Image (cartoon, helix red, strand yellow):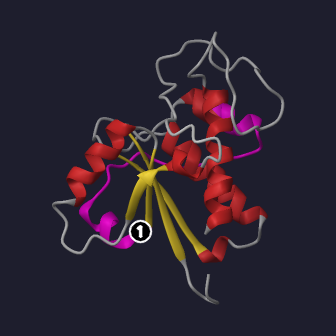
């Protein structure tokens, strides 16, 4: 990154109350810890308008707090301007990717590189499943973030989602 150059990343999921606000908060902490927060503009958004104005899911907030991360994010839907403003739009699953590609085709001069956040996973686990519908998902499955976590009992828990995101966001940061 050239001196003084600011890069930007927008994390996107279906409703902007679980995966994408976790990714935004994790990435914001990562760049802050590396003392390069002034070189990154970070945000998150939804492909849908279902949760606009809502805070992240209580389970997502709890998971973040358990890892010393706070967020004041309010859900928002992606806009046409986002495709022209952000360098990267990183989404969580194929459905998000299809929706974003379709929306980007309606935008003149789309500058954003649109891809799955999982593209940055060296293990190539591309999809970050939606943990929204899993009950009791905050069971402590692991103590420290690891890149790939497999747990058959709760495959889509918020803790697993958090750990997958922290891994992928870290590799994205390192490549950029």
Horizontal side of residue 61 vs 116, given as left or right: right
Measured as percent of width and height from the top left, residue 36 is found at 70, 73
Measuring 65% from the left and 47% from the top, which residue is drawn there?
Answer: 122
Q: Is residue 59 above or below residue 76?
A: above
Q: Is residue 163 above or below residue 111?
A: above
Question: For this rendering, which residue is in front, 16 or 115?
Answer: 115
Q: Check the image and name the residue furthest to the right.
A: 143
Quadrant assignment, res 31:
bottom right
Is residue 70 visible from the viewing direction of this image?
Answer: no
Measuring 57% from the left and 47% from the top, which residue is drawn there?
Answer: 23
Picture quarter with the C terminus = bottom right
- The magenta segment is 62-87
Measuring 84% from the left and 29% from the top, which residue is drawn there?
Answer: 143
Give the residue at mark 1. Answer: 86
Measured as percent of width and height from the top left, residue 80 is found at 24, 63
Horizontal side of residue 24 vs 52, given as left or right: right
Q: Secondary structure at mark 1?
A: loop
The number of callouts visible is: 1
Quadrant assignment, res 150:
top right
Measured as percent of width and height from the top left, residue 1 is found at 62, 81
Question: For this rendering, which residue is in front, 146 or 47?
Answer: 146
Horizontal side of residue 92 vs 94, given as left or right: right
Crowd around label 1: few <14 · some 14–19 · many ≥20 (10 Å)? many
Measuring 19% from the left and 66% from the top, which residue is drawn there?
Answer: 107
Q: Check the image and name the residue furthest to the left.
A: 106
Is residue 45 visible from the viewing direction of this image?
Answer: yes
Q: Is residue 106 above or below residue 19?
A: below
Q: Check the image and name the residue furthest to the bottom.
A: 3
| 72 magenta-colored | yes
Measured as percent of width and height from the top left, residue 158 is found at 61, 27
């Amino acid at each position: 990154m050239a001196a003084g150059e600011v890069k930007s990343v927008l994390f996107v999921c279906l409703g902007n109350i679980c995966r994408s606000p976790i990714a935004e908060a994790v990435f914001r902490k990562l760049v802050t810890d590396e003392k390069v927060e002034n070189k990154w503009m970070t945000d998150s958004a939804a492909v849908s308008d279902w949760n606009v104005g809502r805070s992240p899911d209580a389970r997502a907030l709890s998971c973040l707090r358990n890892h010393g991360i706070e967020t004041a994010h309010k859900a928002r839907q992606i806009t046409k301007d986002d495709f022209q403003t952000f360098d990267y739009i990183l989404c969580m699953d194929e459905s998000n990717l299809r929706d974003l590609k379709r929306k980007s085709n309606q935008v003149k001069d789309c500058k954003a590189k649109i891809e799955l956040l999982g593209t940055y996973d060296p293990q190539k686990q591309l999809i970050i499943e939606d943990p929204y519908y899993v009950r009791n998902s905050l069971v402590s499955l692991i103590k420290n973030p690891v890149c790939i976590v497999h747990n058959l009992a709760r495959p889509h828990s918020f803790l697993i989602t958090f750990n997958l995101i922290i891994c992928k966001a870290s590799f994205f940061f390192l490549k950029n």
